Image (cartoon, rainbow, N blue to C red):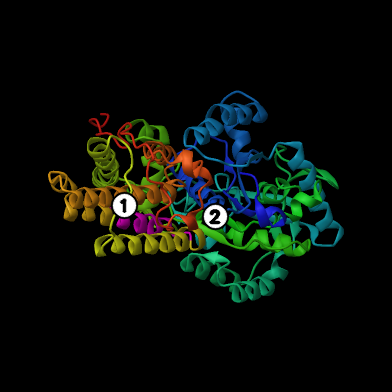
Amino acid sequence: MAATGSTAGAKAYYVSTPIYYVNDAPHLGHAYTTVAGDVLTRWHRQRGEKVWYLTGTDEHGQKIMRTAEANGVSPQEWCDRLVADAWKPLWEHLGIANDDFIRTTERRHTDRVREFVQALYDKGEIYPGGYEGPYCVGCEEYKLPGELLEGEGGEKLCPIHKRPVELLKEENYFFRLSEYGPRLLEHYEAHPEFIQPESARNEVVSFVRQGLTDLSISRSTFDWGIPVPWDERHVIYVWVDALLNYATAVGYGADAERFEGTFPADVHLVGKDILRFHAVIWPAMLMANGLPLPGKIAANGWLMVGGEKMSKSNLTGIKPQDLTSHFGVDAYRWYFLRAIAFGSDGSFSWEDFTARYTSELANDYGNLASRVAAMVGRYFGGTLPEAGTVGDAERALHEGLATAVAEADRRVGEELDFAGGIAAVFDFVKQVNGYLTEQEPWKVAKDTSPEARDRLATILYTAAESLRAIAVLLHPVMPSTSQALWESLGAAPALGELADQRVQDAGTWGRLPAGSTVTKGKVLFPRLEEPPA
């Protein structure tokens, strides 16, 4: 969306997802984070802000090299295939409105990574050394001995992937991470919002207080990576490479104006298993090269299946298409943010999804939209009537809407409390349903007196205007169904496109003009068929 008015010279509200490994197709966990970022950035666009939303793929490292070899292709061919056939099509399918998609094999990234690392080396922040220790290829990370689990045969297992680690011994280059512990702790203290939720912040603070060790930033036992500029026998550690996407994608070293107008990120959305990379290593690297730190590192919890973290390596990955084909894309986008508090672990349940879909989407929201359109059609020929005398029942709805707008804007826009923000809107949906139940317009319509006709007009205008506001508030979460509702209300001719409606204007009562043509469109949330076997 183009910048308007006073936002033209402002810094963009910049949100990123992690860049995802392309060793396999995406699953629900990847989609959960990406949909959350999409909802957050759509929300800020509807505040009238400049926004930049970045996602992408992480394509270097030993894990991808081995996966490609197992599939009989080169690493680059494997990455190209997965990006084209799996990752980009899924984001399009889910309605993700990202502004950019960065691939770490692109020249715009690889050249700038070499420049960044060279600058660290020139400042004396990097030195040669040796390292030996347990290494998880799945995490692309050396593990501390105390972190490992004991396997049935006595082997040491990665606590995340539950697979044996490898003992590696290499000559590497090291970044002086240990020197940045005090500065990091000072930053955490001065900016308590920097790491969210609080449990994640406490974990990171505790980790840093125990003392940091210098970080191995190169690998010499394989060659699928970005060559170290001063010693091309080594490739840059994949996590150093990957973290820098947040800078290279917005013009670091190539477009100073764009970089200054976007960087640093306002919010990095990450999984809690990669929190330390983003909350410790990334800010230390930025400090070392004199760059500003991001505003917030927001760690979402794990999606669980059968008590296990959802992942490809644990064979618990579920394709989003398995659910969207049954529930629909918008219901999918809504469910995970509604059912799971962002930052907490949550278990996916087909039964819970079905129950919530039926109760909240079909019965509360969808049925409300259908009933109002049908009654405007039946009693006023499809033309929205002008409201007559407003009473206490209507004023209660006006107040309820103002509360819902303020609550949703605070929770979604500021606190990343998607579940709380969505709940605030659906509390208002329930309030509108309750209003119709109490006012009984179908009974009022039987009275042909002018006073009753005036009352009926007021009831139906109030309900339709409530739906106008609901369409605006739910558009970031469910863009397609909100658009269908907007069209059903005949709102566009007078108010313009739904995507251009401001969140803060949603609570301004009376924006939908009398005389709008209201039509009963398709059912927003149709009855679910029997689930697949």
Q: Residue furthest front?
A: 450
Counting residues from the start of the chain, the first of labels 1 and 2 encountered is: 2
Near mark 2 (Cα within 10 A), the count class, few <14, some 14-19 or many ≥20, is: some
Q: Is residue 327 left or right of residue 407?
A: left
The residue under label 1 is which amino acid type? Ala
- The quarter of the picture where the C terminus appears is top left
Cα–Cα span, label 1 and label 2: 28 Å
Front residue of 97 and 149: 97
The residue tagged with tag 1: helix, strand or loop?
loop
- The residue at which mark 1 appears reads as 387
Quick one: SS at disc 2?
loop
Q: Can residue 423 be found in the magenta stretch?
A: yes
In the depicted structure, whether residue 303 falls above or below residue 397: above
Q: Which residues are magenta?
A: 416-429
Q: Which mark is residue 47?
A: 2
Task: Name the residue at 62% across, 31% down.
Answer: 79
In this view, 357 is above or below 502: above
Residue 265 seen from this side: yes
Q: Quadrant of residue 206?
A: bottom right
Q: Is residue 24 within the magenta segment? A: no
Image position, residue 153 (x, y; %): 42, 48
